[in-house]
Amino acid sequence: MHSLKITPNVPVEDIEAAKAFYTGFLGLADEEFNLGWVARFTSPLSGANVQLVTRDETSPVDSKMSIHTDDVDAAYSEALELGYDIVHPLNTESWGVRRFLVRAPDGTVVNIVQHRP
């Protein structure tokens, strides 16, 4: 698998309540998207980013990080071949990303995602 970017997923109870700390104090001022249950904030200077997540909209388990890749279908096939625990199957979500969630051997749930143009 080819990892393009890694984004931490920070669990929060309320995105709007947490937003000021991440955008103001930490300088992650650009809101890339906000779906109400997940929002990504990025530094306009460095590109550093974080996702705030209240709960995953479609997965039964929340992930700790999102790994962005250029070929999620190949990554899914590889994860299956290696026998990893798929906790949310590969699909195209209603908000336009194609993704699956996999449990690492240490128990960490990882969101493997490809953004489509």
Image (spheres, rainbow, N blue to C red):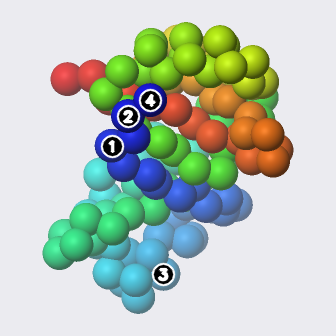
Discs 3/2, front:
2
Q: What residue type is labelled 2?
A: His
- According to the image, label 1 marks what residue? 4
> Where's the C terminus, which quadrant?
top left
Measure how far apart labels 1 and 3 are at the Cα level: 27 Å
Query: Which residue reaches farthest bottom?
Result: 25
Which of the 4 image quadrants contains residue 82? top right
From the top left corner, tell me how far across and down residue 85 is, in percent. Answer: 78, 24
From the top left corner, tell me how far across and down residue 92 is, in percent. Answer: 46, 14
Q: Which amino acid does label 1 sit on?
A: Leu
Q: What residue type is labelled 4?
A: Met
> Where's the N terminus, which quadrant?
top left
Q: Which of marks 3 and 2 is nearer the N terminus?
A: 2
- According to the image, label 2 marks what residue? 2
Picture disc at residue 1: 4
From the top left corner, tell me how far across and down residue 70 is, in percent. Answer: 31, 28
* Residues marked 2 and 1 touching at CB (< 8 Å): yes
Measure how far apart labels 2 and 4 are at the Cα level: 4 Å
**Nearer to me, 77 or 49:** 77
* Residues marked 3 and 4 touching at CB (< 8 Å): no
Which of the 4 image quadrants contains residue 96? top left
Q: What element carries label 4?
A: loop
Q: Characterize the local packing of mark 1: few (<14), some (14-19) or many (20 or more) Cα atoms within 10 angstroms.
A: few
Measure how far apart labels 3 and 2 are at the Cα level: 32 Å
